[in-house]
Image: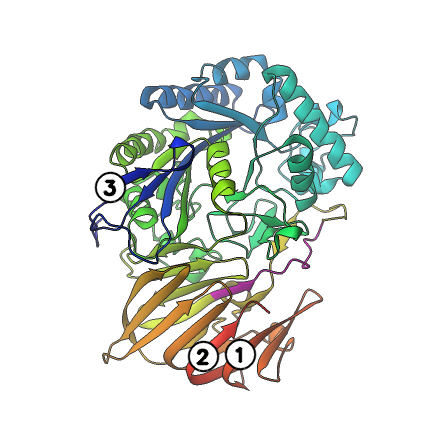
Amino acid sequence: MKRLTASVFAAVMVAAFGQTAILAAADGTQQPGVAPVRKVLNIVNFVRSADPRPPRADMINAVREEVALNLKYGFKNTILLQYDALVDPEMMAEALKSDKAKTEFGLWFEMSRPLNEAAGLPWKPKGAHKNWDWDWHINPGFLMAYDHAGRKAIIDAAFKRFKADFGYYPKSVGSWLLDAWSMDYMEKTYGVDGFCICREQDNTDAYGLRGGYSNGAYYPSKKNMLSAAVDMKNAVKSPVFKMLTPDPIYNYGKPRQLYAGFTSIRGAGCPTMEPVWVGGYEPEIVDWYFRVYTEPKGLMNLSYMQAGQENSFGWKSISRGWPMQCAKIAKEAAAGRIVVEKMCETARAFKAAHKANCPQTQIALEDWSGCGRKSVWYNSRFYRANLILDGKRLVFRDIHKMCDDFEEPFLDKVCTGWQALYFTPPVVDQWMFRGKGVSGVMSFDGEFASIETAADGDALVVTAKRVDGKAATVRFEEGRIIVSGAGALDAEYEAGFRKNISIRNGGIDFLFQGYRYRVPVRGEVKATAKGLSIAGDRIELDMSN
């Protein structure tokens, strides 16, 4: 694949904890008024033992080889242990070959028969899984399948065993899905520094997440772990990281249904850096990830990458990409373009630097697939938004609000079914709002040729140039989106959601899952056959309301 852009990398300064790399501007000086950016990579390998799908020898060998690569390169790294692995002497013997000074051990929180028995709770997998000791369904495999007393018993049992083995409580906890109640309990009771959860996805396996920070770190709301806390009095006081480095262009909806680019390659799998999928085993795409997360102008506060793989895939699959990735990680770190840390170190550095949620961006101004798409994400405590140039069409593909009182589905309830779907309140969402003859996006007038990005403090400025030479500007600020030169923004919604939108008193009212919220607007707003239109030389969406 042809590299489309190149950058000159700058010098590195050392900051908090002696581990924080702050990269200067490309000319070697820090741009005035622009917040310094930490460019960090965590290696997180998580370990199961009870998974009945792969041969046991493959799972053990995966841990052995992952540890060997960490030792070879001297990486700081994090190993998260599922309870059944923690009590498995053979699995632990391989994990404990790690360099103890450079390896952080933590907990991977999926349920299994050994954990439930230790907590005094029944283990009841269903259907074809009824004889399994581990189950990927939410019920019984995740904390949401239990009431608060059950969650407490499970958490206490896991932390008790971990401390018995290691002499201390774990500082990092991960799971494909965690709930806000459990996060808050772990942080308050056991002093957990940081959590990691699945990237945004649409009901892959048994869980779907739409909304929240597209990547990076955030303090979650106590009522919804997917939503960044607007007010820190409503926050879990330890940050959440999104796992395994999502693709800023193609990690949205189901790529094969939205775009041909990602799934034109057979067996593309997940649009992340996971080494078992094409995005993680094709060297050119991995190089692209490093450029996207380190080079663009407009990155702010924390540009976060996570690499690694669960041992359930087995070494044969993991080895397709992981040794190559490790060599590239070592090269990037040696050049000062990233700093490799334990997850707990990154969490502590974030807490030291940011007492509340801060803006973070992901910017892809080149497309590894050759389709020419450009994608810009802005995340703050009030909202997240995605601007994408697809061909000559410029659109907001996504805008979601953060609301401290919007509850996750199983905050206080028990999930009795097989799946759990988490959301934040949507304003624009191409994946959910598309339909027959309806795009689901908010589009700009005219045809566009390019976009450029720049940071202005905690604001991101995107300049979009039309084919005719005229420009439109989008300024993402912490609490509002300001659009100049658009002429009009036209939003389309499928009929079912369209009936839950109303225009009133200079703003737009929404109803989603029984929750009412409002976006005040500067500009002329009117209803259209497919949704709404906002016109004006300067259009403002107030996302702080």
Identify the residue under disc 3: 11
Question: Which corner quadrant of the image does residue 277 belong to?
Answer: top left
Q: Position of residue 444 (x, y in %)?
A: 39, 77
In the image, residue 221 lies at what x, y percent?
63, 51
Residue at 58% in and 12% down = 89
Question: Considering only order in the chain, which callout, 3 or 1, is on the residue closer to the N terminus?
Answer: 3
Question: For the image shown, how many numbered marks are present on the structure?
Answer: 3
Residue segment shown in magenta: 398-410
Amino acid on which the number 1 mark rests in the picture: Val
- Which residue was labeled with disc 2? 539
- Is residue 169 placed above or below 441 in the rendered structure? above
Q: Under tag 3, what secondary structure?
A: loop
Q: Position of residue 53 (x, y in %)?
A: 56, 29
Percent x, y of residue 257: 45, 60
**Label 2 to label 1: alpha-carbon separation:** 7 Å
Q: Residues within 10 Å of mark 3 (few under 14, many from 20)?
A: some
Residue situated in front as seen by the camera: 495 or 346: 346
Contact? badges 2 and 1 (CB < 8 Å): yes
Q: Confirm whether the magenta stretch covers residue 407.
A: yes
Query: Which quadrant would the C terminus be assigned to in this image?
Result: bottom right
Q: Nearer the viewer, residue 116 or 412?
A: 412
- Residue under the image location 62 percent in, 17 percent down: 87
Kindly report the secondary structure that dominates the magenta region of the rendered protein: loop
Amino acid carrying mark 2 in the image: Ile
Label 1 or label 3, whichever lies nearer to me, is: 3
Disc 1 vs disc 3: Cβ atoms closer than 8 Å?
no
Whether residue 484 sits left or right of residue 85 in the image: it is left
Name which residue type carries label 3. Answer: Ala
Measured along the vertical axis of the image, is residue 478 above or below residue 498?
Answer: above
